[in-house]
Amino acid sequence: MTEMTKNLMNDVDIGKVASLAEKIMQEPHVANTKWSAEVKWNGGFRSEATIRDFDAAVSDEPEQLGGTNTGPNPVEQVLGALGNCLAVGYAANATAAGITIKDMTIKIEGDLDLHTFLGLKEGNAGFSGITVDVKLDSDASPEALQALHDKVTNSSPVGHTLGRAVPVEVKLA
């Protein structure tokens, strides 16, 4: 175990997060960031998203929706993004609060009516609701875990994005 690993709680280097927060307090413009992805269609319902320098994340539809089931579909990826964002929030905020997380599981489900997607009627093609169940194994008190939960759900970028209307402009080039 390296010296750096010994100083981490929940495998989080909270010092890096604190340094960024301090820099943003001194230079507020640093907080304004832009994130991006590039998606390449690969035929049928298959595509792949390239993000930064990572291997492409594949996407496809299940066979019953006409795909070849070679990867999760976009709505499943949205659910995964929410769960991943919440996991980051719990890990970072637990570490900042001195709470050790022994284990964490986040289960997410979304209700989706396929009528609009399939062109069978007008309406909402997106989720009508999303439920999230978080299981945290920790020795922290129920009150400390509730405070952690409240902080995470009130500061999740993906949670906030999904929970409000966000302007989306799709242009054809």
Image (cartoon, rainbow, N blue to C red):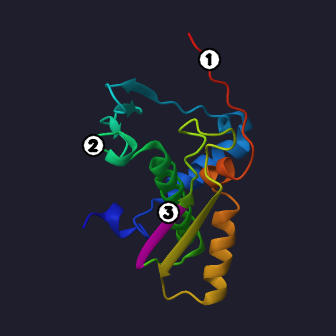
Which of the two labelled residues, at mark 2 and mark 1, occupies the earlier sequence position? 2
- In front of the other: 152 or 10: 152
Q: Residues within 10 Å of mark 2 (few under 14, many from 20)?
A: some
Which of the two labelled residues, at mark 2 and mark 3, occupies the earlier sequence position? 2
Residue corresponding to mark 3 = 87
Residue corresponding to mark 2 = 70
- In front of the other: 159 or 169: 169
Tally the marks.
3
**Residue sitting at x 66%, y 80%:** 146
Q: Nearer the viewer, mark 1 or mark 3?
A: 1
Describe the element under mark 1 as helix, strand or loop: loop
**Residue sitting at x 59%, y 55%:** 18
On the image, which quarter does residue 53 sit in? top left
Q: Quadrant of the N terminus?
A: bottom left
Q: Which residues are magenta?
A: 102-109
**Residue sitting at x 61%, y 81%:** 145
Q: Nearer the viewer, mark 2 or mark 1?
A: 2
In the rendered image, residue 156, in percent from the top left (x then y), is placed at: 63, 56
